Image: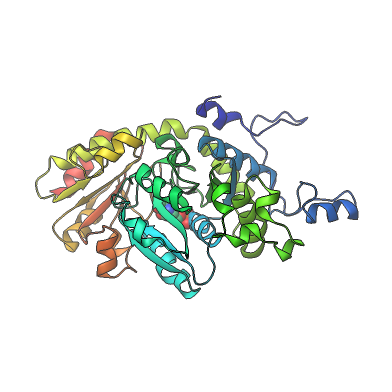
Amino acid sequence: MKDATLALHLGYEKDNQKAMQVPIYMTTAYEYESTEHAARLFNLEETGNIYTRLDNPTTRVFEKRIAALERGIGAVATASGMAAVFYSLTNLVQSGDNIIISNKLYGGSITLSTHTLNKFGIKAKFFDVHNPEMLEDMIDEGTKAILIESVSNPALAVPDFEGIGEIAKKRGIILICDNTIATPYGVKPLTLGCDIVLHSSSKYIVGNGSAIGGVIIEGKSAKEKLSSYRYPQFNEPDESYHGLVYNKKFETPFTARARLALLRDFGAVMSPFNAWLMILGLEHLYLRIKAHSENALEIAKFLKSQKNIKKVNYPFLEDDINYKYAKKYLKYAGGIVSFVVESFEKAKNIANSLEIFSLVTNIGDSKSIVTHPASTTHQQLNKEELIKAGVDEGLIRLSIGLEDVEDLINDLKKALN
Ligand code: PLP
């Protein structure tokens, strides 16, 4: 079946009520048949519902559908996109290890990697996604993960997927891609050398700014890499499960451990109600991402025609530094356009003057949004970190919604003048 069909039907079998929409199993726990049955479930000898911190029938439908759209073989939903980033990294690292991250990432992923994980003894090193050969010298015995974004937020960098994937494969390092902005309809990173994909499903997946969520998807290639000496936690007995070895027991060891160890212990699980909203969002994601991307390209072209704008970033603009990668790898680049004006003050004035665009720190809503990263999302980064993240003080980020594009252009014209 094709993606649009999978997104509507996969993983749901109607019960006697014949409900057309997936029911919301709003429950904390599930009744066991007997103490023996409960013991078998807890010992992972049998699969079945135990407790919603680990698994839930509504959430399972969302996980199956997004895994299929990404060409993955397993998925685990989380309470937020940041929980998905956190679990993806902490599933791989132990104190003393290091990770290599793109120098153009979402600000939250940078602070997690460079500040919070650093306090747990994990070091983050930056690389340029257009110069994958840098990785050769950076990878060492302690390197456990490489983290990139398919279209980065807010710099909109599109990586050299194949170049990075080739080195990650040769050196046996798990390559994680945050696919929040492009969505699986824009690109499928698991088919381009990545092993793990993650999303903030708070954005295009839910599609209307109604709920926070995240998801981690495991590709088929992860298991082989995880069987190396580099990842002992997947190959040595887990005493908290009576000696379970994830790589032996599961075809999807990455998502199995994220669920059974990390969700069990850290608990940032997606609520079944939010999973249901994500299911609704996935139903028409393919229509929305096309419309967001078409509107965004038109707005990027309009901005390019304006004087007083120093730079416009959109991967499908022909003179954009990312164009050759976008042409090669992306079907859609999503609805984020950014541009740079001469100063911090000018950027703030434009953001304050827009009327249809709301001044909000979010992306991927059906309604258009304007953000000034230097005063909000990236405020915690110092000047050097801002430059590394590709965030100029005069940078304005637009998340182009589904309004009529002419209305959006008229709003921008007024604010720019
Ligand atoms: N990844 C990207 C690319 C994002 O843009 C964001 C949030 O903006 C996140 C992860 C974090 O997601 P959440 O806000 O759902 O925790």
* Quadrant in which residue 326 is drawn: top left
Is residue 406 something one can see in this rendering? yes
Q: Nearer the viewer, residue 318 or 173?
A: 173
At horizontal 85% and vertical 51% (from top left) the residue drawn is 32
At horizontal 20% and vertical 54% (from top left) the residue drawn is 350
Residue 407's x, y, as percent?
26, 36
Residue 55's x, y, as percent?
68, 50
How many marks the image carries: the answer is: 0
Residue 144's x, y, as percent?
49, 60
**118 w.r.t. 154: above or below:** below
Q: Residue furthest top?
A: 1
For the N terminus, the image quarter is top right
Residue 392's x, y, as percent?
22, 59
Q: Is residue 138 left or right of residue 206?
A: left
At horizontal 73% and vertical 57% (from top left) the residue drawn is 244
Q: Is residue 100 left or right of residue 85?
A: left
Q: How is the image coloured?
A: rainbow
Q: Nearer the viewer, residue 278 or 152?
A: 152
Q: Nearer the viewer, residue 125 or 353?
A: 125
* Quadrant in which residue 14 is drawn: top right
Is residue 403 something one can see in this rendering? no
Q: Quadrant of ligand 1?
A: bottom left
Q: Is residue 313 left or right of residue 2?
A: left
**59 w.r.t. 87: above or below:** above
Q: Is residue 47 left or right of residue 345?
A: right
